Image (cartoon, helix red, strand yellow):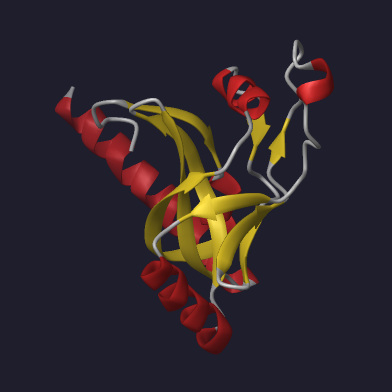
């Protein structure tokens, strides 16, 4: 995402790629207050322990920490409050069916500005077992060794 025109990445959830297999990615908007947007512009947001869930036909992101804006005084909201995600109803119904029946989880992967608006990349994920994590680490290490050997050989 960071290489596309008009996109400024604010926060990434790298732990999600370690703990889950990401099957699909969706872009959605967030319903935020002004002081939260100002705090996000300063990069004071953490996605590490966040997840999304569907309640009454709406998607809510839980556990996303947006630090209070320093000049916000009485207008600041709770940093860990649930925030509503904005998606089409048909997408929400599709995700709800997958989460209920097939054991998927909705994990926020990335938070970014796109043409001045805050967007969240939501991943449809399946959890990894311990052996899957070891396999991913071994594959990443072997790919790194191959790239290093190719680079050294070209010199």
Residue 76: percent from left, percent from top? 78, 26
The answer to whether residue 13 is seen in the rendering is yes
**Location of the N terminus (image quadrant):** top left
Between 138 and 94, which is closer to the camera in this rendering?
94
Residue 139: percent from left, percent from top? 42, 57
Compared with 72, 108 (above or below) is below
Between 4 and 76, which is closer to the camera in this rendering?
76
Give me the residue at 39% from left, 62% from top.
Answer: 88
- Total count of labels: 0
Q: Indicate left or right for 14 with 53 as reference.
A: left
Q: Indicate left or right for 33 with 4 as reference.
A: right
Give me the residue at 56% from left, 58% from top.
Answer: 107
Between 69 and 13, which is closer to the camera in this rendering?
69
Between 64 and 126, which is closer to the camera in this rendering?
64
Give me the residue at 64% from left, 32% from top.
Answer: 33
The answer to whether residue 134 is seen in the rendering is no
In the rendered image, which quarter is residue 99 located in?
A: bottom right
Give me the residue at 39% from left, 25% from top.
Answer: 116
């Amino acid at each position: 995402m960071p290489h596309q025109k008009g996109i400024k990445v604010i926060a990434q959830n790298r732990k999600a790629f370690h703990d889950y297999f990401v099957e699909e990615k969706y872009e959605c908007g967030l319903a935020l207050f002004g002081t939260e947007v100002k705090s996000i512009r300063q990069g004071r947001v953490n996605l590490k322990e966040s997840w999304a869930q569907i309640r009454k036909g709406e998607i809510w992101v839980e556990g996303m920490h947006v630090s209070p804006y320093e000049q916000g005084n009485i207008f600041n909201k709770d940093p860990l409050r649930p925030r509503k995600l904005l998606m089409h109803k048909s997408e929400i119904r599709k995700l709800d069916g997958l989460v209920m029946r097939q054991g998927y989880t909705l994990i926020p992967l990335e938070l970014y500005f796109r043409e001045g608006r805050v967007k969240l990349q939501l991943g449809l994920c399946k959890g990894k077992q311990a052996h899957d994590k070891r396999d991913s680490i071994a594959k990443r290490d072997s790919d790194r060794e191959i790239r290093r050997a190719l680079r050294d050989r070209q010199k």
